[in-house]
Amino acid sequence: MKYRVDIDSANKAKNSLSGIIDGKDNRLINKVGAFSSLFQLDISKYKQPVLVLKTEEPGSKQVLAFKHDKIESVCYDMINHLINDCICMGAEPVAVQDLIICGTMDPAKIRRIVSACVEACQEQGCVLTGGETTQQPDVVPEGTYVLGSSIVGIVEKDNIIDGSAIAGGDVVIGIASNGLHTNGYTLVRDLITKNPKLENMKIGSSSFINTVLIPHKCYYRPLKSLFNTGKIKGLAHITGGGIKENLNRILPADKNANIDLNAYKIPEIFMCIKSESGIVDEAMLRTFNMGIGMALVCDKNDVDYIINNLAENGEDSYRIGEISAGEQNVVCTGGLNY
């Protein structure tokens, strides 16, 4: 039958995951195969612990990643994007659950996906506790894999970073991205369809396709030493919608963020996409991060401290704007210098 689910094959694939997940972190106190995961959470260091919850998926970037056998890469995309959203609250990422939906189950690919998710979590000090792997042949085409994940983070209530402390005169710092991260891939795929030679176009010392498949950068490790210092007033993960539709999400109702586009350091990949697509800068800013992966708001007296701290942790960051009275809008001035 066309839509038959091979239960034996699925069970074999799932059972093979125990060696990847079980025993890797003492906080996970049961094994793969249980109906739910048991995670022992240590809240002894918190007075008023608050859980931070988020669900994410890597979007259409996964189509290109699977096509070019960059399975591990897109798993890092998904986990790093997920953690970045979580840490915008000042949270410590704790536990992740994954979701894999496929038309037919290839045990080798499933192992690669789960192994990469485990490694991406471990690099950020959290743990993949399990998840769901399911065949849906009448929903997902054969050979297609759809990924998703959810996270639990934790933050002390008094140390939550939510933008409520942002005041007039505060400064917006941009923390550099390493490329597209996980946004704008519908446009990228369309450009490749129209011009297949684009994949091999040189971007610096690499190719276009390898450059657009660089994994989404995770900002937790370089930022975590700044958490609980009171120096960060707001964090905005710059994803789909760009600076305007992400930074505004953390602004108080009576404040604007004034962004100087002349300050942006724009990676070469965006110059290439601009040239190939011919889309206007406003659309580029709404579709892509344009070189700013995270925006941080702080008091003007803390700017040098934060920039120096981030530099010591390997991150390039620089001033891109300031806060003024307004109506919760992000106002961009100047122009992008490609």
Image (cartoon, rainbow, N blue to C red):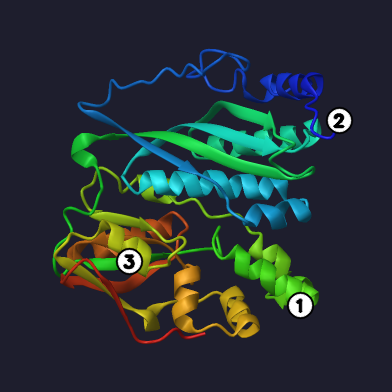
| Residue 212 horizontal/vertical position (percent) | 65, 64
Disc on the earlier residue, 1 or 3: 3
- In terms of secondary structure, where does tag 2 sit? loop
Disc on the earlier residue, 2 or 3: 2
Camera sees residue 309: yes
The local crowd at label 1, few if under 14, some if 14 to 19, many if 20 or more residues have their Cα within 10 Å, is: few
Tell me which residue sits at (64%, 49%) in the image.
74
Q: Nearer the viewer, mark 2 or mark 1?
A: 2
Where 79 falls versus 302 (above or below)? above
Tell me which residue sits at (59%, 85%) in the image.
278
| Residue 310 horizontal/vertical position (percent) | 39, 57
Q: Where residue 1 is drawn, which disc sits there? A: 2
- In terms of secondary structure, where does tag 3 sit? strand
Residue position marked by numbered label 3 in the rendering: 173
- In terms of secondary structure, where does tag 1 sit? loop
Quadrant of residue 141 within the rendered picture? top right
Q: Is residue 335 left or right of residue 272?
A: left
Camera sees residue 179: no
User: Contact, CB < 8 Å: mark 1 with mark 3?
Assistant: no
| Residue 290 horizontal/vertical position (percent) | 48, 72
Cα–Cα gap, marks 2 and 3: 57 Å
Amino acid at the residue labelled 3: Ile
Q: Nearer the viewer, mark 1 or mark 3?
A: 1
Residue position marked by numbered label 1 in the rendering: 195
Disc on the earlier residue, 2 or 1: 2
Where 37 falls versus 132 (above or below)? above
Q: Residue furthest front?
A: 1
User: Contact, CB < 8 Å: mark 2 with mark 1?
Assistant: no
